[in-house]
Each structure stands twice: as C-alpha cells, then as structure tokens.
Amino acid sequence: MSDQFIRPATAGDVSRLAEILVFNNRINFYPIFRCDEFSFGEMQVIPIANQFLADPQLMARTFVYDDGIVRGMMVLDGDEVKRLFVEPSFQGRGIGAALLRFAMERHHVTHLWALEKNTRAIRFYERHGFRLTDEKVFEEDTTEYLIHLKR
C-alpha cells in the first residue's frame, strides 16, 4: 500500500473517523473492559464526530487513508502515535502498515502506547520495528495496563 492515499483529515471526514473509532472500540476493547456504559453509551458516532469538529488541534494531528473511501485513521502527537485504527472490514490489507510507515517516515514517530491485552496490535507494531519497553501505566480509570513501545 502506498502513502499516496494518506492525507490530513478534514471536516468532511469526521463521521467516518467516528465510525472507525466506535467500531474498533466495540470489537477490540469491549471484550477487555466489558463496560456497556462506555462502549454503547459514550462511544456514539455523533458526539465523537462533534469532538473532532470542536477541536482544531485534534483535526490538525489526524490523518486518513482515503482511496475514495476513508478506510483508516491515525492521530499523531509529536513523535507519538496516539491512535491508529483501520475500519474492521478493511483490516489485513496493508492500510494500517501504510499509515504507520507514513507516520515514521514523514513525522518521525518513535513511540506509542498500546493496551497490554491488545496482543494483535502489539504484534502489528513489533512487525514494524517497535519494541516493548519496561514502561507501563494504567489506562485512565481502569485496572488495565498500557505498555510503551519504541523504535
């Protein structure tokens, strides 16, 4: 996959950004946290889309993979990947790899945090040169760990 399809997010993308976040949360994180209130109450497309629209700084740090359909998204913060998600229907097609490569090559990303129990994501990042460190912290308001990966 080429990074020719990666571009900064625009206001026209916010519904897809929100959908991708909601779907990934429910598929990947609900089985770990089992929090109905968050996954099915707070994680709603319209409020999340509005969060993006209300935060120009967040929008400026958000990129999409768009080949005619927004299939993936990521949020960067300096040299850190804050979020990287691909629409579940399009996973396994190199979209996440293209987004991560773009982040490393164009934005010099060197680290990220991943949920310790999200082993699929950890393996993905390790395949792309990231290594686990000894650093871990609790995910806010939970008993689950985030682990630090660096390249």
Image: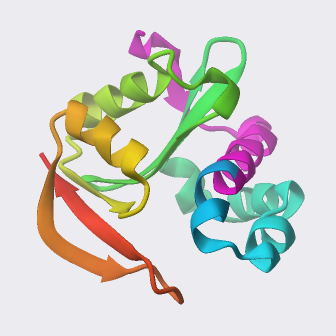
Question: Residue at position x 35%, y 70% from top?
Answer: 146
Give the farthest residue toward the bottom: 141
Q: Quadrant of the C terminus?
A: top left
Q: Position of residue 58 (x, y in %)?
A: 55, 58
Q: Quadrant of the N terminus?
A: top left
Above or below for 143 versus 56 = below
Please tell me which residue lies in front, 74 or 145. Answer: 145
Magenta range is: 1-26
Quarter of the image where one finds residue 26: bottom right
Magenta region includes residue 64: no
Q: Is residue 134 left or right of residue 146?
A: left
Question: Residue at position x 23%, y 64% from top?
Answer: 148
Q: Position of residue 111 (x, y in %)?
A: 22, 54
Question: Residue at position x 64%, y 26% from top?
Answer: 71
Please tell me which residue lies in front, 55 or 120. Answer: 120
Please tell me which residue lies in front, 124 or 99. Answer: 124
Question: Residue at position x 76%, y 38% from top?
Answer: 16
Q: Is residue 113 left or right of residue 50?
A: left
Q: Is residue 145 left or right of residue 7?
A: left
Above or below for 19 versus 149 = above
